[in-house]
Image (spheres, helix red, strand yellow):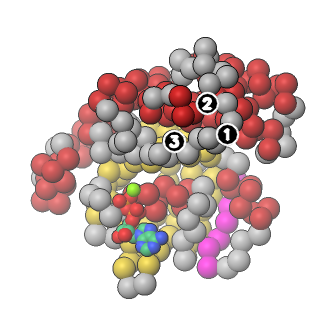
C-alpha cells in the first residue's frame, strides 16, 4: 500500500497541491490525469521523494516519513526502495550499455552481486523485447526501445510500485504503442502501476482507478467508468481537450 496523507506543495505563491490525500492498494493500475500544470508530476515525484512536500506524510508498505522536518538519508532510502520511476525522457545512462543500464542499479543498491544482476537484467530485458540488444548503447536505439530498457531497469530493482511519468509522450504513435503494450502486460500481471499520462484509452481500458487533478487538488478519485460518465464541467472540459 502507498499512502500520501495531507501533502501540500507551493512554489512561491503558486500552490500546486493543497492538502492532498490518497491511498493506493497493491496490485492495481492507477492513472493520474489532469491538465498541464495541475501537479501530476509533482504528486508522482512525492511517491518516491524526488520531490518533497512541505507538509503531510508518506507511507509505502510499512515505511513512513513525515514531512516538514529534515529527512535522514536512511529514511529516504527506506521509502524509496519500494518504488521505481520511468520518465518521459527515458534518462538512461548514456555511457552504459543496455545491459549496464539494467544491471547496475540493483548492484549499487547493494542488494545483489554483479553476476546475479546480469542474469536478472537479461530476464527483464527479454520481458520487454530487448534481450537481443545487450551490448548496444542508448544512442543507437529508438525512443521506444530506450523506454523499454528504462522499464526493464525499473523492474530490475524489483519495486513494489512502478511509477510512470508520461512514458509515451515523447514517442511517435508506433513506438508509443510498443511501450504501451509492455505496460499493459505489467498491469495484467497484477503489478502496482501508477501512471501519469494523457493516454485516455489506457485509462479507460487498463486502469482500475483514475485520479484527476485540478485546481490544486483531487477533482476525482474512483473507477474509470465513473470518471468517463462524470457530468462534472471540469472533467468534461478536460476530456474534450485531451480525449
Ligand atoms: P504537470 O505534471 O501536471 O504538468 P507539474 O507537477 O510539473 O504539473 O507542475 C505543477 C505546477 O508547479 C506548474 O505550475 C509548474 O510550473 C510548477 N512547478 C513545478 N516544478 C517547479 C519548480 N521546480 N519551480 C517552480 N515551479 C514549479
Ligand atoms: Mg508533468
Left or right, 232 with reference to 19: left
| Residue 108 spot, x, y in % from top left | 80, 44
Which residue in the structure is indicated by mark 2?
Answer: 137
Which residue in the structure is indicated by mark 3?
Answer: 90
Q: Secondary structure at mark 2?
A: loop
Residue 198 in sight from this viewpoint: yes
Query: Is 130 situated above or below 243?
Result: above
Query: Is 115 situated above or below 56?
Result: above
The residue carrying pointer 3 sits among few (fewer than 14), some (14 to 19) or many (20 or more) residues within 10 Å by Cα, namely: many
Q: In the rendered image, which quarter is residue 66 located in?
A: bottom right
- The mark nearer the N terminus, 1 or 3, is 3
Q: Residue furthest bottom?
A: 13
- The mark nearer the N terminus, 1 or 2, is 1
Residue 242 magenta: no
The residue carrying pointer 2 sits among few (fewer than 14), some (14 to 19) or many (20 or more) residues within 10 Å by Cα, namely: some
Query: Is 241 situated above or below 176?
Result: below
Mark 1–mark 3 distance (CA, rounded to whole Å): 14 Å
Determine whether the beta carbon of the residue marked 2 sits less than 8 angstroms from the nearest atom of ligand 2.
no
| Residue 114 spot, x, y in % from top left | 84, 30
Q: Secondary structure at mark 1?
A: loop
Left or right, 123 with reference to 34: right
Label ID, residue 95: 1
- Asked whether 115 or 62 is in front, the reply is 115
| Residue 135 spot, x, y in % from top left | 67, 22
In front of the other: label 2 or label 3? 2
Mark 1–mark 2 distance (CA, rounded to whole Å): 7 Å
The residue shown at (26%, 39%) is: 200
Q: Secondary structure at mark 3?
A: loop
- The mark nearer the N terminus, 2 or 3, is 3
Magenta span = 61-68
Q: In the rendered image, which quarter is residue 130 located in?
A: top right
Amino acid at each position: 500500500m502507498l499512502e500520501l496523507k495531507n501533502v501540500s506543495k507551493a512554489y512561491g505563491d503558486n500552490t500546486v497541491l493543497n492538502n492532498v490525500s490518497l491511498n493506493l492498494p497493491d496490485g492495481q493500475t492507477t492513472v493520474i490525469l489532469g491538465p498541464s500544470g495541475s501537479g501530476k508530476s509533482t504528486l508522482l515525484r512525492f511517491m518516491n521523494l524526488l520531490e518533497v512536500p512541505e507538509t503531510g506524510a508518506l507511507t509505502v508498505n510499512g515505511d513512513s516519513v513525515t514531512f516538514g522536518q529534515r529527512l535522514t538519508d536512511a529514511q529516504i532510502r527506506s521509502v524509496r526502495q519500494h518504488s521505481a520511476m520511468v520518465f518521459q525522457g527515458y534518462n538512461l545512462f548514456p555511457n552504459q550499455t543496455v545491459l549496464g543500464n539494467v544491471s547496475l542499479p540493483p548492484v549499487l543498491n547493494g542488494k545483489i552481486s554483479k553476476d546475479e544482476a546480469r542474469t536478472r537484467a537479461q530476464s527483464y530485458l527479454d520481458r520487454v523485447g530487448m534481450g537481443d540488444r545487450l551490448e548496444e548503447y542508448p544512442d543507437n536505439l529508438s525512443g521506444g526501445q530506450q523506454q523499454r530498457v528504462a522499464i526493464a531497469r525499473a523492474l530490475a530493482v524489483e519495486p513494489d510500485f512502478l511509477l510512470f511519468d508520461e512514458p509515451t509522450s515523447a514517442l511517435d504513435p508506433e513506438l508509443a504503442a510498443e511501450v504501451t503494450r509492455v505496460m499493459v502486460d505489467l498491469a495484467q500481471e497484477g503489478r502496482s502501476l501508477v501512471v501519469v499520462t494523457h493516454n485516455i484509452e489506457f485509462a479507460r481500458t487498463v486502469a482500475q482507478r483514475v485520479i484527476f487533478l485540478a485546481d490544486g487538488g483531487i477533482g476525482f478519485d474512483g473507477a474509470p467508468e465513473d470518471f468517463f460518465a462524470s457530468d462534472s464541467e471540469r472533467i468534461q472540459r478536460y476530456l474534450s481537450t485531451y480525449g
